[in-house]
Amino acid sequence: MTQKFLLPLAILVGLLFPTLVQAKPKQCYDCHKEAQKEFGSFDKYIWQFVGGRQKVNRWKSLQEIPAKTSESDAMSKELKLRGFKFVGSTICYAFMQATGMVDDHVQGCFRYRVRANKDRI
């Protein structure tokens, strides 16, 4: 029986904001555990889509920031093959931004400058 659940994306890797999805929590849990068992940790599995390192972009304006990328397309495709639900490419890219896998601060943002200064130290 499928019902709407407030399912935190924390089930994926500890993301803190909840999303309304149509899914079976047990199925998501099982998919997560399978990936965890296969790769040693879900963290190792999910970070492979950005090569294990944060991808730092250098956008000049918000309009340049894409809604999805080839990495989020690959993540979405792989998660769907593993049985995850509600994991389209745009959702995956938002997830990558929220967890720090991708840094999309524009060059004029104070956070971009703070990070750039730390990188020089």
Image (cartoon, rainbow, N blue to C red):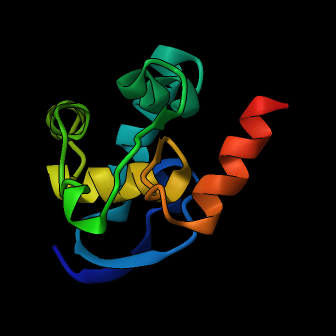
- The residue at the point 15 percent across, 32 percent down is 81
- Residue 86 visible, this orientation: no
Residue 9 location, quadrant: bottom left
Which of these two is toward me, 58 or 97?
58
Is 62 in front, or is 14?
62
x%, y% of residue 11? 49, 56
Q: Where, quadrant-wise, is the C terminus in this rendering?
A: top right
Where's residue 104, x and y in %?
42, 53
Q: Report the label total.
A: 0
Q: Quadrant of residue 111?
A: bottom right
Location of residue 35 with respect to 89 vertically, above or below: above
Q: Where is the N terminus found, in terms of image quarters? A: bottom left
Residue sitting at x 54%, y 25%: 53
> For this view, does 96 lie left or right of residue 92?
right
Residue 71 percent location from the top left of the image: 25, 32
Q: Is residue 105 left or right of residue 14?
A: left
- Res. 42 visible in picture: yes
Q: Note whether 42 is above or below 25 in the view shown.
A: above
Given residues 56 and 29, the one toward you in this image is: 56
Which residue ends up furthest to the right in the rendered image?
121
Q: Residue at x 50, y 16 (%)?
A: 39
Say above or below: 94 vs 40: below
Q: Residue at x 29, y 66 (%)?
A: 62
In the rendering, at what x and y percent does residue 3 appear?
Answer: 21, 81
